[in-house]
Amino acid sequence: MEKKTILKLAACIMLCAIMIYAAQAQTNAPAAGNTGRGGGRSGFGGGMMGGGMMGGSRGPTITKTTPGMPDVPMPDPAVGRKAKWPIRDANNTPPEGLTARRPQDNGFYKRDAQGNQVPGTDLYLWAPSGHFTNYDQDDIPPYTLPDPLVMQDGRKVTSAEMWYKERKPELINLFKDNIYGRVPEDKLPKIIWEVRQENRTETAISKTIIGYFEGTDPNAPAATAGGRDGGGMGGMMGGFGRGGGGNTITITLNLPNTGHPVPVFFGSPVDDPQGHGWGTGSVSGSAGVVARISPPDGQPRPGNFPGNYAITGWAFSRAMDYLVTDKDVDAAHITIAGMSTGGKQVLYTAAMDDRIWCVVPESSGAMGVKLNRRDIGETVDNLASGNFAGNYCPNFTKYIGRWNDMPIDQHEMIALMAPRKMFITGGNLEDWQDFKGGFLAAIAAESVYNLLGKKGVATVQVPPVEQPIVFGEIGFYQHNGGHTFTANERAWITAWMEKFLPKTQAK
């Protein structure tokens, strides 16, 4: 028997075992509406948040009480833990038991007697707001999530039609106006696409395509705006572009030549895509849109001026405009994947564009899949100020220290994916990313998947580390380790994708 066949058979056996495990976990899960205490670093504790959403205009309340105790709404984060925060002095003296990672830095690690970082410990930060990082599950103040199936005016969403026509557009507008910003698409010229390079062999196809605003020279130097280049974030993010300078959006495609359209992965989270008959690609640049939409020099940007994630998401959506016309691409099966900051980016991008079939946010943390109201690890305060503030719109800063005032949370970003597919991954040792908060967010989005006739994560209990949930529209996998993307993750995502995508050979 060939090696590939043996590996395939082993993967199928493991997949069946996990599905049986997950089904048993679902059967043994606590009843909907129960609340419970959080587990430790890697033990998430069954029953947290229960299943489904409660009635009324708010969702389930997370408390630190035992099941059956009254729900307690979350106070302002600054109230919940402020008495326990260390005092920051003028010399930036490290709190007891911690050592600065760099002189006069606001970041700290636990170190041993020899001054080495203790293995497995995370970064502690003083945010500009004064908030100090928490890693204690039992020190998370109670909080209440907004219900994704309740309109801002209090009406319940009772049908798929109401979701698509009213609630989904409302959530998109809330995210754009409060967190990410909006690109004024109605004021922008058309994007023109040109295939600049194309090579075909008997087994493979490669292409480079550029897009640029109608009436502009794609070869001209990029305009600048306020000290930023015309393309947003610059660089690449695991095969998924983060903007970049220049006047163009560039798409690269590497496809197997199968004689018919093939699914394409941007970020390539799967094993041997071409061997499966799947393609890979990348998108970079944003056609100099920042300079085009920025106000004149000396004038402030509006509160909903798009941050880097919105700019890059807009650019990928323009790339989708091209991909749906390419006869070599199965545009109904486009997957985007990103790690860490890239995970935040791809989740936003996919949630905003229904043409994206699947998203794989890897170790995405706060403003990724993590619930922002959970005061543990990375928080809104860390992202809405300092080096990361440019990823969001100016309005986002008003929620520093006021997380519970946000009209949305990340479970509603996951809900915007419904009924489409996503696979959430992370490590059991990366508390900065709060992987548990990502699982709770997936549970809180389940009601929307159910309304649309699908299962999301489809359980309220996380299986042990290295054993994924793979039977719903939302896959979920926790590797043993820290902030990285492992071979096991790639293998499980590949097996999950094989359930939905045909495996074909090059002609």
Image (cartoon, rainbow, N blue to C red):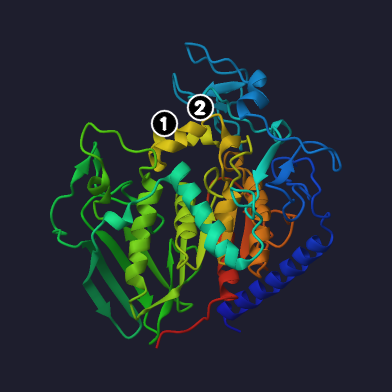
Q: Determine contact: label 1, label 2, CB under 8 Å.
A: yes
Q: Residues within 10 Å of mark 1 (few under 14, many from 20)?
A: few
Where residue 124 appears, x then y in whole percent?
A: 56, 29
Q: Where, by quadrant of the figure, is residue 443 drawn?
A: bottom right
Tag 2's secondary structure? loop
Tell whether 386 sits left or right of 360.
left
| Mark identifier at residue 386 | 1
Mark-to-mark CA distance, 1 and 2: 9 Å
Where residue 102 appears, x then y in whole percent?
A: 45, 24
The correct choice, above or below, for 126 with respect to 17 in the image is: above
Visible residue check, residue 339: no
Whichever of callouts 1 and 2 sits on the residue coming sooner in the sequence is 2
For the point 21% across and 52% down, the residue is 246
* Residue occupying the far right of the picture: 68
Tell whether 309 sits left or right of 20.
left
| Mark identifier at residue 270 | none
Q: Which residue type does callout 2 highlight?
A: Ala
* Nearer to the camera, 462 or 366: 366
For the point 75% across and 64% down, the residue is 22
For disc 2, the marked residue is: 127
For the point 43% across and 37% down, the residue is 395
* Nearer to the camera, 414 or 127: 414
The C terminus - image quarter: bottom left
